């Protein structure tokens, strides 16, 4: 990291810690914007990394907008045939994990909220092409997409991805976005857009948009079962939330460990073993060092057996709820349609304010 990036990161951490301290006391001060692209079903990396936190925040009473970013799939995926089905499966995963849609929790698909997308043109006038080209997250995603063949060319939608995200966050005046460290450049770009809009169009008036803050995840990064890459369905190293207990056991049997039978928690020198211990820890809330000590000389077999038991027990209620929801697709469609209606109401109100300050009302 450069000195400037270190300063930006340190400031984001400080803001995140302050929000974490205050949010349980004053939940109504905040509006969370979070979500996923419907590229497939969710896995345990999503479960531990974001879904549990969404449930926690919504149970506190924090107004929560959960975006299914269907339009954004088009930026780096040629396949679009399964977007509708994947959208419904995302909702099933959300509800099975404990998210409860209602007045305080709105789940909606991006493409059904045109008011959000109407912010795109004014927002694009507030950033330069050079700023978009410098965004490190976009650069990394472009390089990865071209390298693995997922992208053949770089379309303009990919380059303007951070502005899409700014629209998603700001249309509902989201002021808290739960993210990992790698997503901070997007949040900084959104803060820049909000600041520039307010400075340009709201002189002498209260700004339309809040400056959103990142709520940084406290959950350690979870690698795939290969122990070397981010967990991903496409890499074949993930345990999906929709997997059965037997499928989970079969996947874990193939997980990578090492040749040392004595189990220790050493993330630097034994990353594969440490990753499996970390997943057990997330299930049982026991320290990974203590789990390693208990397993002792049991080797990879004992480690995998312990992980299988812990993960299947953790996911048992999720799977039971999933099975119920799979048989009630009318309800899933209802959640999406009602969520889109509520999101549009919010977007219409914001767009009216935007037109007012931009002197575009008729």
Image (cartoon, grey):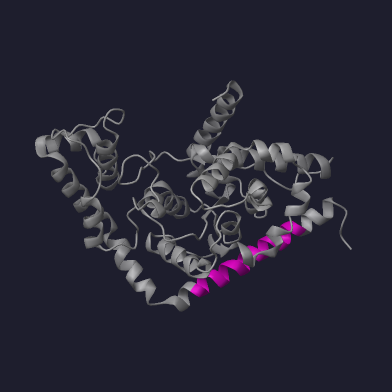
Residue in view at x 52 percent, y 36 percent: 16
**x%, y% of residue 361?**
87, 60
Viewer-closest of 79 and 271: 79
**x%, y% of residue 209?**
71, 46
Q: In screen coordinates, is 167 left or right of 29?
A: right
Confirm whether residue 22 shows in the render: no
Q: In screen coordinates, is 59 left or right of 251?
A: right
Residue range of the region highlighted in magenta in the rendering: 333-351
| Magenta stretch: helix, strand or loop mostly | helix
Q: Quadrant of the N terminus?
A: top right
**x%, y% of residue 62?**
52, 52
Residue in view at x 51 percent, y 41 percent: 215
Determine the image quadrant of residue 118: bottom right
Determine the image quadrant of residue 286: top left
219 versus 268 height, above or below: below
Viewer-closest of 191 and 129: 129
Determine the image quadrant of residue 289: top left
**x%, y% of residue 301?**
14, 45
Q: Quadrant of the C terminus?
A: bottom right
Q: Give the residue furthest to the left.
A: 297
Viewer-closest of 158 and 302: 158
Magenta stretch holds residue 254: no
Viewer-closest of 150 and 358: 150
Confirm whether residue 336 shows in the render: yes
Residue in view at x 48 percent, y 37 percent: 21
Q: In screen coordinates, is 218 left or right of 69?
A: left
Magenta stretch holds residue 341: yes
296 versus 144 height, above or below: above
């Amino acid at each position: 990291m450069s000195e400037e990036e270190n300063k930006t990161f340190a400031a984001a951490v400080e803001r995140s810690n302050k929000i974490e301290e205050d949010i349980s006391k004053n939940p109504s001060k905040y509006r969370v914007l979070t979500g996923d692209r419907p590229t497939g079903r969710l896995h345990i990396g999503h479960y531990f990394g974001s879904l549990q936190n969404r449930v926690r925040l919504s149970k506190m009473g924090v107004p929560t907008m959960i975006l299914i970013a269907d339009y954004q799939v088009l930026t780096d995926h040629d396949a679009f045939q399964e977007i509708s089905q994947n959208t419904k499966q995302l909702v099933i995963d959300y509800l099975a994990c404990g998210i409860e849609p209602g007045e305080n929790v709105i789940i909606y698909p991006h493409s059904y909220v045109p008011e959000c997308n109407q912010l795109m043109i004014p927002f694009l006038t507030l950033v330069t092409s050079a700023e978009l080209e410098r965004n490190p997250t976009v650069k990394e995603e472009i390089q990865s997409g071209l390298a693995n063949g997922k992208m053949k060319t770089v379309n303009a939608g990919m380059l303007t991805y951070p502005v899409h995200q700014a629209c998603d966050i700001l249309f509902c005046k989201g002021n808290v976005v739960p993210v990992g460290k790698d997503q901070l450049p997007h949040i900084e770009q959104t803060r820049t857009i909000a600041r520039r809009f307010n400075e340009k169009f709201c002189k002498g008036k209260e700004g339309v948009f809040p400056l959103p803050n990142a709520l940084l995840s406290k959950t350690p990064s979870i690698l795939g079962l290969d122990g070397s890459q981010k967990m991903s369905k496409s890499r074949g190293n993930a345990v999906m939330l929709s997997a059965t207990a037997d499928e989970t056991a079969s996947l874990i049997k193939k997980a990578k460990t090492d040749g040392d039978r004595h189990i220790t928690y050493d993330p630097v020198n034994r990353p594969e073993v440490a990753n499996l211990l970390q997943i057990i820890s997330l299930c049982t809330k026991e320290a990974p060092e203590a789990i390693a000590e208990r397993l002792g000389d049991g080797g990879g077999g004992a480690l995998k057996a312990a992980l299988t038991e812990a993960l299947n027990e953790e996911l048992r209620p999720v799977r039971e709820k999933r099975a119920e929801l799979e048989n009630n697709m009318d309800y899933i469609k209802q959640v999406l349609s009602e969520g889109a209606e509520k999101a549009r109401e919010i977007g219409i109100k914001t767009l009216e304010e935007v037109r007012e300050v931009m002197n575009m009302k008729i």
